[in-house]
Structure formats: C-alpha cells, structure tokens
Image (tube, grey):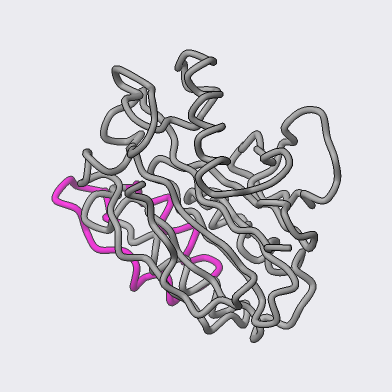
Amino acid sequence: MNWIAPDWPAPGNVRALSTTRDGGISEGVFAGLNLGAHVGDAPARVEANRARLQQVAGIPGTLNWLNQVHGIAVHPVSDRYERAPDADAACAREAGQACIVMTADCLPVLFCDRAGTVVAAAHAGWRGLQGGVLEASIAAMGCEPGEILAWLGPAIGPAAFEVGGEVRDAFMAEQAEAATAFVPSLNEGKWLADIYQLARLRLARAGVTAIYGGEYCTFSDSERFYSYRRDGQTGRMASLVWLEK
C-alpha cells in the first residue's frame, strides 16, 4: 500500500502509519480507501476498507474508532465500549490497542514515549488545536513531556489554509509567537495559516521538543489525499499508532 510510515526514532515496539487513498474499494467522490462511516459512503464499502486496513496493518482485536467533534477529550482505548465515544484523541498503554484518528485536512498528531510504554493520537483541526487537544493528549500519556516523540501527519498545507482574522486572534491571544504561523492572504481580511507551525509551537510550549513530520499538503495532492476544503463531500484517511505485543 502507498501509505505513510512516520519518519521518527520511535522504539521498536511502536508501530504507526497514516493511510492515503490507496488500497480501498470506495467509488465516486469517496474513491479509494475511505475510512469514514459518517460522510455518506456506502456502509459496506467503509467496513470493507476498515477490514483491509486492519489486515494490512496487522492490528489484533477491534479497531478503536472515535466520534470526532473538534473538542479536546482524550479516550483511553483500553476501556471497552460498544459505540464510538465523543473524543478527538486517544491514548493506550496496552499492546494491540490502536489509537486512531481520521482526517481530511485537519492535522493528525501521533505520540509515543521513548520507552515504548504509551502511545496517543490526536485529531487537531484549528479549533481543537487552539482549544488544547495536544496538551490534553500529552497529559493523558502521564509521562514527562521531554520523553515524548510527536509526529505531524498529512494536513492542509500553509499555502492553502485560509482563515479569518478571528482564528489568528484566538491563537495569538494565548501565544504571541503564533503570529509567525500566519501570513496575509490575497483576500482582504483573510490569513494563510500554517497548522504545522501552530502545532509545533503548542508542543514546544508543553515541553515536547522531539517533533517530526509536517511536510504534506492534503489540499494540493488530490491523487493521494482526501481534502474536505478542496472537495466538500469526500472520504477520510486514518492515522494510527499502537504498541506491539
């Protein structure tokens, strides 16, 4: 599969990946490996795509999907549940329990500690990022931030992510350095935001210095990635991290 393996110095028992459109059976606007059950795709196709993901990745048990709401709640995936919880991040200490987030322009962030004892995944759109979903994920891991590795997965790039002034103001109200992540757009009153830089700033402030990834643009690469801002109705990719037994 033409999926993405994080380029980070994670311990040997940590496994992680980010899917692309490659390898699925969905059709039309969802063409490819759509993993989102909430976007209007045929349920049978989504289930087949999810089964393919689990088979190729080699994850045992049940995949732990979230009902993402652009918030900051972190779900401990070692807890068993019958329906997807309302959360935008997940944390796991038990081997074989994958932390999974879905995106199609928002930023997926994967975490592990240097000892390979805990992993986490966060879905960071600008609201969740500004609200503190990365900081909440770090807190849920329960280890020193300096012992954490973070990988920034495929998201909308800085040349395509246009936002209003209220978004810039919200970030700068908490962190003056956030100004470095915004440049004026050609459209009056709008700004181009670098969500990767915003995430790096938030992670660094939280004490995480080992930060990797952040080189993709989901909006500009339609063959490889789904993009909600580009296409409207579209599929979802998944970014996963788990501990091997």
Q: Is residue 105 above or below residue 116?
A: above
Magenta span contains residue 188:
yes
- The image shows residue 174 at horizontal and vertical percentages of 55, 68
Please state the extent of the stretch shown in magenta in the rendering.
163-192
208 or 235: nearer the eye?
Answer: 235
| Residue 31 lies in quadrant | top left
Magenta span contains residue 3:
no
Side of 25 where 84 appears, left or right: right
Side of 160 where 72 appears, left or right: right
- The image shows residue 236 at horizontal and vertical percentages of 44, 35
**Residue name at image x 36 percent, y 23 percent:** 233
Q: Quadrant of the C terminus?
A: bottom right
| Residue 206 lies in quadrant | bottom right
**Residue name at image x 80 percent, y 59 percent:** 94
Q: Is residue 239 above or below residue 226?
A: below
- The image shows residue 19 at horizontal and vertical percentages of 42, 46
**Residue name at image x 36 percent, y 44 percent:** 20
Side of 81 where 101 appears, left or right: left
